[in-house]
Amino acid sequence: MSDVISQESFDELALYFNGGGHLLTPDARRSAAERARILCAHGLDALRQYTHRTGMTAHYYVAPYDTSDLLRTGADALALTGVRHELSGMKTPLIDAYILPSDLTKFAPNWILEPAPPERANVILREVFTLPRVLRLHVAADLLHACDIGVVDERAQERAERIMKELCRPSDR
């Protein structure tokens, strides 16, 4: 397996884990099944490799009082993930979302988002060419990424691990 997975392949893997394997092409289904087997055998260590996918991940800082306005008015451009997704069960000021390239070029300047080192970011925007339907695997990988860069505490890793255990139950696929 390569170090960086394409966002499209990751989305297919997430769909496979969510019981959508029948929607994939035979080749995509075989690939997703093999990746799922490895993920379930190796847990978070294997998931960590999927925190880096094709596409740009941009880290920004915005004044904390602007985050709720940003979410309210920018919601149409964002597909929330990680700690901001309801599946995480977490409450945090961090905004973590997928965004289209065309929206990213408008979004960052409009909101006066300052590029920031990952550990200082309170906005993580993950550039994708198609906004995904954010599924449990997206949330788990993005929780782990946020924990690894130090913008959330270890509860994020615990939540990622819990989601992975749920995904790896045979009845869930």
Image (cartoon, rainbow, N blue to C red):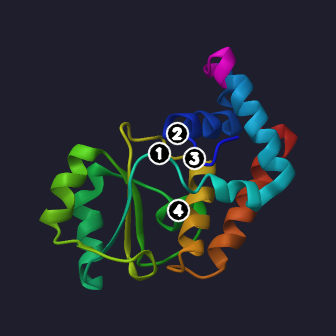
Q: Are marks 1 and 2 in contact (CB under 8 Å)?
A: yes
For the residues bearing labels 3 and 1, Cβ distance under 8 angstroms:
yes
- Closer to the camera in the image, 17 or 106: 106
Distance CA(mark 3)–CA(mark 1): 7 Å
Label 2 sits on residue? 6
Cβ–Cβ under 8 Å for marks 3 and 4: no
Three-letter amino acid code of the residue under disc 3: Val
x, y percent for residue 74: 24, 58
What residue is rendered at 62% in x and 72% in y? 156
Write down the region rendered in magenta: 23-28
- For mark 4, give the secondary structure: helix
Residue 11 on image: x %, y %: 55, 38
In the drawing, what numbered circle is on residue 54? Answer: 1
Q: Is residue 39 magenta?
A: no
Query: Mark 2 to mark 3: distance in Å?
Result: 7 Å
Residue 25 inside the magenta-drawn segment: yes
Residue in view at x 15 percent, y 54 percent: 106
Mainly helix, strand or loop, the magenta region? helix
Residue marked by disc 4: 82
Q: Given the image, on which type of amino acid does mark 4 rest?
A: Gly
Task: Identify the amino acid type marked 2.
Answer: Ser
Helix, strand or loop for disc 3: loop
Assess disc 3: are there few (<14), some (14-19) or many (≥20) residues with their C-alpha within 10 Å of its C-alpha: few
